[in-house]
Image (cartoon, rainbow, N blue to C red):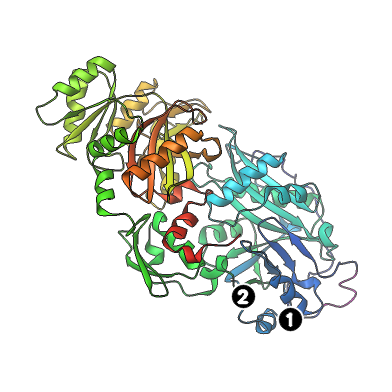
Amino acid sequence: MAAHVAGHRRRTAVPTTPAITSRSWKRPSQHQLQGMRSDVVLDLGWGRLVFGQTFADLRGVVDALRAEESGRRDICIYPRDPHVLVGLAPDELFIDPSYTYRLDLHRYRPRHELIRGVFVRTVTSQAEMEAIKHIYALNGMVVGDPGTMWANHRTRAFTYLVAEDRRTGQIIGTVTGVDHKLAFGDPEAGTSLWCLAVHAQDAPPGTGEALVRVLAERYVGRGRAYLDLSVMHDNEAAITLYRKLGFARVGAVCVKRKNPINTPLFAARPPGVEDLNPYALIIAEEALRRGIRVEVTDAEFGEMRLSVGGRTVLTRESLSEFTTAVALSRCDDKRVTRRIMERAGVRVARGALACEGELGEATALLREVGEVVVKPARGEQGRGITVGVTDDDGLARAVALALQFCPDVLVEELVEGEDLRVVVIDRQVVAAAVRRPAEIVGDGRHPVSDLVRATSRRRERATGGESRIPVDEVTAEVVAESGYAMDDVPPTGERIRVRRTANLHTGGTIEDVTDRLHPEIAQAAVRAASALGIPVTGIDFLVPDVSGPDYVFIEANERPGLANHEPQPVVERFVDLLFPETRRRS
């Protein structure tokens, strides 16, 4: 593992067997509690940890949990007699369906070999807390407040670690540790692990293990007794990892409040929800958090019926009954979309039409501009698109490919710039992101073909099968343009593009740039959505710089994937549009 690792020095077990946290029904003696603060509550930024063993009266725990702030997730760990605690407020509290696992640190043994490509270190700035917040959002966790986390980190009671990808320097994982002895004088000298999260698409294998090991070794160095963590009962991958590292289950449980965030944990989920794709599931989860009834009408299609009171809205991912058939048809035919944009004053690339046997206009445009993009006039997910056509033979092949998807073909000038998606909901820009074609990063050991497959597997896992990198002739051609063959072994850190288009369904990646978006581009996106008459859309531009005013409109998507734009509040704004009466009040 690429981090300072504790050596095999002899460690002495803590002489007293932990009893306060392992036997919740047994009231600890005053001797056992000696030196421990009472009624301990720690704020971690995403919620508070309520240490149940420090409360003499269970009603004090109830009061502490009732003080939970909106949008946060408080957790009571180690409550004494949890069934009695819940019984004091059964309409408000529930026992979390999770397990507590414990690692006896005096028995911990470091890993002999390194975990390649991962460097685990301590957080060094509040800016890195922002990166941690982003990873939380990508994993569907309650995001933390960077200021609170940074203030915590400046005390030794809290430890915030991040994992760097050695090839790119990118932060791709994080974990938080709490030292109970330093935090409240715990006589058991215990510690706990919270918020283990990795970037599902970019993290090298073993990143989670590296983070857990380094945290454990930090606490071994302090002479602590054990490291505890809470894990959902059905998270088999995480449980397998913890068991591998020597963790064993103990009897401690967690108690939480019945708040909207926790609804999936204590309320029965509608049939079919678990079968939804990520783009529909994220909407279902937000609806359930607000108390909106969710009926899955076609899981494979991503279709749901959402109901509040007597009003019902049918949705398919981010497409709803609020989008009219006319607006849908305007987005579906790129020729129509171009005409509407031109009338609305939104800049478009020069273009020409082509069909079978009719390439005159397209050829003339190619002569004039030198390089073009060929795409079906109707279609989605990047099917049939060819980027970078420079000669007549290439034009004929590209048109033939596009004709397989639509009898009409659009040929446009290739404009240099980054592929920008702007999400507009209810005539307001909610998110903006730069989309980049799939690429691999060399590690000095594996050939391009293996790296493509490994990267594709990570993309597929992270998106529920929605994104994968094809290994085909196009991939081989793009790799060859970078000077490599599929069986070459690129050096460590070498980035190689493997697809021409930035479509997420073929492995493209996305970077949030909402805070950098130039106002003129934002205004153009709103103007485009208004001209199309569509309430929810993804407007695609090519831009030389997202922070500058220049852009060229490419197309409008009537069903943008909202799951791709967290941590921006795209899902919240979508549900606000459907059911404004459920909007959270600030």
Instruction: Give whichever of discs 2 and 1 has the lower sequence position.
Output: 1
Label 1 environment density (alpha carbons within 10 Å; few <14, some 14–19, many ≥20): few
- Say left or right for 376 vs 171: left
- The region drawn magenta spans 28-34
**Quadrant showing the C terminus:** bottom right
Q: Secondary structure at mark 2?
A: strand
Which amino acid, by three-letter code, is at mark 2? Ile
Q: What residue is at 28 percent from the left and 49 percent from the top?
A: 327
Q: Is residue 536 magenta?
A: no
Placement of the N terminus among the 4 image quadrants: top right
Q: Position of residue 543 (x, y in %)?
A: 43, 29
- Main secondary structure found in the magenta portion: loop
Checking the image for residue 95, the label placed there is 2
Q: Which one is in front, 122 or 18?
A: 122
Residue 53: x and y in percent read 78, 72
Residue 141, position as x, y percentages in the image: 57, 56
Q: What amino acid is labelled 1 in the image?
A: Trp
Tell me how many marks there are.
Answer: 2
Task: Check residue 30 for magenta coloring.
Answer: yes
Q: CA distance from mark 2 to mark 1?
A: 15 Å
Q: Quadrant of residue 347?
A: top left
- Residue 72: x, y in percent? 64, 61
Q: Residue at x 80, y 51 (%)?
A: 10
The circle on residue 25 is 1
